[in-house]
Image: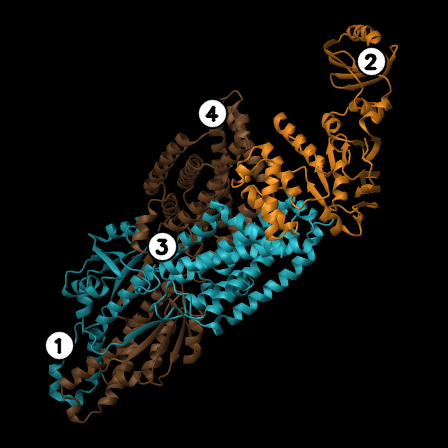
Chain colours: A brown, B cyan, C orange
Amino acid sequence: MLLQTLHIALQYLKTTYRSRSALIFSLIMPLVFTGVLGVTIGGGSQGGEPSRWDVALVNEDGGVLAASLVSTLQASPQLAVSLLPRSEALARTETGDFVAAVVIPSGLSQALQDGKSPTVQFTANGSQLRPAQSAEQAVRAATSELASTVAAARTSVAVAEKLGLFDRGADQAAYFSDALARVAAQWTPARPITVQAEPVTRLDSADQIAGGFEQSSPGMLVTFALVSILNGAIVLIIEREQGTLRRLLVMPMRKGGILAGKLLAIFAAGLIQAAILILVGQLAFGVNWGQAPLALVLLLLAFSFSVTSLGMLIAGVARTYAQANALANILMYSIAALGGAWWPIEITPAWMQRLAQVTPTYWAMQGFSDIITRGLGVGAILPELAALVGFGVAFMAVGVWRFRYE
Amino acid sequence: MKSIYIALKDTLIRFRDRNGLLLMLAAPLVLAVICGAAFGGLTGGGEAASPITDIPVAVVNADRGEYGQQVVDILFSADLAKLLAPALAADVAAARAQVERGDVRAAVVIPADFSEAVTSQGDASTAIRVFTDPTATYSPLIVRSIVEQIANGFSPGILGGRVAVAQLLEQAPVLGPALAQLPAAVAEASGRSDAPAGIELVTSTVGAEEQAGGFNALAYFAPSMAILFLMFTIFEASRSILGEEREWTLQRMLSTPTGFGAILAGKIGGVFLTGVLQLGVLIGASALLFGLNWGHSLPGLILLVIGTVAAAASLGALITALARDAAQAGIIGSAVALIFAILGGNFLDSRAYPAWLQPLSKLTINRWALDGFTDLSMRGGGFGDVFPEIVVLFGIAAVFFTLAVWRLPRRFVR
Amino acid sequence: MLPDTSPILEAHDLHKSFGTQPAVKGVSFAIGAGEIFSLLGPNGAGKTTTISMLSCLLAPSAGDATVDGHSVTRDPLGVKRVIGVVPQEIALYPTISARENLVFWGRMYGLGSAQLQARVAAVLDVVDLADRAKDRVETFSGGMKRRLNIAVGLLHEPKVLFLDEPTVGIDPQSRRRILDTVKELNRQGLTVLYTTHYMEEAEELSHRIGIMDQGQLIALGTQAELTQLVGQLDIIHLGVEFNGAAKDTLATTLAALDGVQRVGMDDGNLTLHVTEADTALADIIVAVNHAGAHVRQLEIREPNLEAVFLHLTGRALRD
C-alpha cells in the first residue's frame, strides 16, 4: 500500500522534472522575477544599505540659508540629490527619473531672516507614492532643521534685544549673521537632541536592513511554489478526464492510496520548487535563508501542505479541466498578490492587510520574514504554522469530500 | 473574404469558451482591483490615492519632565493622527519585543534625561532612539523622519540659548550691567518655540491624472493586467493553427478551394480580432465598473489598442512559426508572456526600475503599450502623447509580422 | 459492373516519399463517373497518402492525377472545387454547434449566403442530424460526429467524394447508417472514392476495388474479378490454441498436406486455401492435434477479398 503510494508519487515527479520546460519555469523564470522585483522594491539599494530615494533639487535662491538647506538635503542618508534647473527637474520627475522634485524658491533666505514662513515646493511622482512619501518626510526633516537654525539665531537676537544691545548701537544684521553661523557650527557636531534609529533583529549587524531581495526572494518562492502545486493538482482532473485515474482505480489498492500518492507527489514537487528558490535566493541574491533551519523546514512543510490542500479543494469542486485551470490561475495570482508575495504588505491599506489574513500566502510570508529578516526561530512562527496547518486541514477535508474519481 | 470567416470562426470559438473567458476577462479585472487597492486608490474619480497611513508605533517615555511629555503629545496629536497609530509601551524591552514580533513598525524611546537636556544651558545632549522593523521598507523611515522633525523643534531654544550666551558675553563691554539679565532672558526665550518661522512644505503630484487629483493605482494596473492577460490570450490563440493541424481541420481547410495565404491571414486575423475584443471589453468594463478615465483621445486609444494587439499577434505568429510543436509553442508563449510582463512593468511600476533595467524594459511590447495606455489613463494625455508609443508598436508589429509570414508557411510544406 | 462512362478521376503513376521513405510507389487507376471505387488495404498501405495526393494536400513526388479534367499538380484549385473530402479524423470544431460548423465549412467551399442556408439544411437531412443542428459537436456520439464529418464534404455538391476510413471506431449501427448513406448518395449520381481496411465494407459498397499493400496497387477489379485470382479454392479459417506448440513447424506441416495451396498465420488464426475443403479438413485437424495444439473454432468460406489479399501477399488483412 505505502510502496504503491510512493511509486505513484515518484512517477509524477519523474515526468514533471524530465521535461525541459521544468528548467524554464522552476529556475530561470523565478530567477528573473526575484531579481527584477528585488532591485525595484529595494529602490536600487543593496542588501544592508538603507534605501536612498532619487530626488531632483532646484535652488532658485542665491542666499546662504538656501545653500545650507541644499547641503543638509545632500547630507541626508535617505536621499540621493541631483541639482537641476526647474524645468528639467519637473519634467524628469514626471517621467519617473526622480521620485520627487524639491524647489527652493528665490527669496527663501530673505523671508527666513525676516521671520516669515517661506514655502518649499515638493512635487512627487504620482506613480511612486511610497518612495515619495518617505522622501517627503526626509525633506521635512531637513527644512525643519533649517527653520530651527534660523529660529535659534532669532532666539539669540531676541535675548540681545531684551538686554538692549541694539539700542546701544550694535548692528542687528551683523549680530544675526554671526548668530546663524554659530548655530550652524554647533548644529552638526553638537546637536542637542539626536535621533538614533536601529533595526530590531537578532541577525548580525551586516545583514540588518532588508533590501528588496529579502522581500522578493520569499515572495517568489511563495508564488512559484503556489504555481507548481496548483498546476500539479489540476493534473488530477486531466487524469480523470483521460481515464488514467480509472485505470489506477482497478488496481488492487484503495482509492485513498492513489489520491495520497498523487498528492504526495504534488506536495513534494512544491517542496523541490521551494528548495530551488531558497538556493537561488541564497546564492544569487545573498538572502540569509540559513538563519533557523528547523523553523524554515517546518514552515515550508506547513506552507506546501496548505497549498496542496488548496489544490485538492480546486480539484474537488471543479467539474472540468478547463474550469479547474481557470480557477487555479485566478486564485494563484490573487492570493499571491493579496498575501504580500509581490510587494511589501506594509504598503497596502489596513483593510487589505486584514483581508490578507485569510490567505495562506500571507502567513507564509510573515513566517519567512520572521526567519530571514528578524532572525527568529521556531517559537516566533508558531502562529503562522498553526494558521497554515489549519487552512490545510480545512481545504483538504472539503476537497477530498467533494472529489469524484470518475 | 474567406480569411474573414476564418477569423470570425476563431473568435466565436474563443468567446464561446466560458472558462477561457474567466481567464481573458475576469482574471485581469480581479487582479487590477487587487493591485490597484494595494497601491491605493480604488476609484477613478475619488480621493487621491491613500498613502501609507496608521503606522503602528510603540512609544516609551522614560523622561519624567515636561518636555518628554511634549514629544509624546506631538506623536499623539491630531496632526499626525492619519500617519501614525501610536500606543504607549511600558518599557524599552516591551517596545523592542513588539517591534521584533512585527506588532509595530517602530518604537520611539524618549530618554530619561530628555527634559534635562532641553533645559540645560551647557553642552548636554541626548538621543531619542527609534527601533525599526527590518522587514518594512517605508514606514520606519517615515517614523524616523517625523521624530527628527520633532527633535529639531526643540533645538532652537537650546541652541539659541547657548549661542546667545556666547555672543552676548563677547558683547560684555557694550552691555555693561545689563549682562546680569542674561540668564533670565535666555530662560525666557528658550524652551520649545512653536516654530514661528517654519518652512512650509507645499506638496503636489505630477505624473498622475489631473482630475483624480493624485495617483490612481487602478489607472496603472487596469491597463497593466489587461496587457498581461492579452499576451496570454494571444499566444494561446496563435498556436491554435498547430492545434488545427493536429485535429486535421487545417488539412480539411486546405482541401477546400481556399489558398494557404488566406488561411494564414484568417488565423492571424482571428487572433487579432480576439485580442482587440478582449482589450476593448476590459477597457469598457474598467470604465464602467471603476469609472476609469481612458484619456482624451479616442483615436489615440483605438490606435494604441490596435498597435498593441498587432504587435502581440505578430510575436505570437512568430513563436508559432519557430516552435517545434503546439506544446512547445505553449511553453515558449507562457515564458515570453511572463518575462515580458515582469520586464515591462505589469507587476510593478517600471518607472521605478533602476536605470540599467530600463533599456531591457523597453525591449518589451508590454512596456510600450503600458506607457501609452498610462499616458491616457493616468496623465489624461491626448493623441500627441501616445503617438510615439503607437509608432513603436506598429514598428514592432511590422518586424515580427514580416518574420512570421516568411517562416510560418515553411512549417506546413510537405 | 463498371459503369459505362468515361473516367472522372485518373491517377497516373503516383509516387510519394517522405524523406527517403517511400509511402506510395507508382499507383495508377481510373474511376468512372457514378462509380464507387474502394481502396482496400491494411493500415500503412498508403491509402491515406494516395487520397491526400488526390485531394491536393500532398504534392506527388512523381506522377500526376486528374479529377474532372483538372490536374492535381497544375490546377489544384480546380480539383478542390469538384471534390468533397471526408478525412479519417473528425475534422470539426467541437465547441461550436453542428450548424455553425457547416456554415463555416460552406464558406470555405465558397458558398454564398443564399445557397448556404439551403445546402446546410440539405446535408443535415442527408446525415439525419437536423434535430441536433444547434447542439455543440462535443456533445455528439462518435457515430453522429462521423456523420457530420461526412456532411461537411457534401456541402458544395461535389462531383467526387473522398471518404477516408469513415467508419473507424464506431458501433455497428452507426456503421450501417453510414454505408447506407454512401450507397444512397451514389444512387443519386455521386462518384465515391472510399478507403477502408474492412473487407466487408469494400465488398458491400464497391463497384470496383483496388487492393493496396506497401505503397503499391497489387490488384484492381470488381469483386468477382478479384476473387477469381484465388481460383476455385475453399477457404478454411481455424482458431487455434497452440499451448506451446511450435507455430512454424505446424505451418510447414499444414502446407505439405494434399490439397492445401496456401497457409496464412496471424497469431492464433490460421487461414488455409484448399482445393476441396471436405477432403482436406480431416487431415488438417489431425495435423493440428498432432502438433499439440487445439482447434477452438472452424469456418469454411467461399473465396473473398481477404483470401485475395492473402493469396497476393501471403499475409492476413487484419490489423
**3D distance between C-alphas at marks 1 and 2:** 128 Å
- Disc 2 is attached to a residue of which chain? C
Residue B231's x, y, as percent?
Answer: 53, 55
Q: Tell me the residue that label 1 is attached to.
A: B188
Q: Give left or right: position of A168 versus B107.
A: left
Query: Is C153 or A33 nearer to us in this picture?
Result: C153
User: Which residue is pictured at 84% across the width and 12% down the height?
Assistant: C254
Comparing labels 3 and 4, the label whose residue is closer to the camera: 4
**3D distance between C-alphas at marks 3 and 4:** 48 Å
Answer above or below: position of A110 versus C195. Answer: below
Q: Quadrant of residue B199?
A: bottom left
Comparing labels 1 and 2, the label whose residue is closer to the camera: 2
Residue A321's x, y, as percent?
Answer: 50, 39
Q: Tell me the residue that label 3 is attached to.
A: B134
User: Which residue is pictured at 34% across the width and 55% down the height?
Assistant: A346
- Are the residues flagged by discs 3 and 1 from a single subunit? yes
- Disc 4 is attached to a residue of which chain? A
Q: Tell me the residue that label 4 is attached to.
A: A255
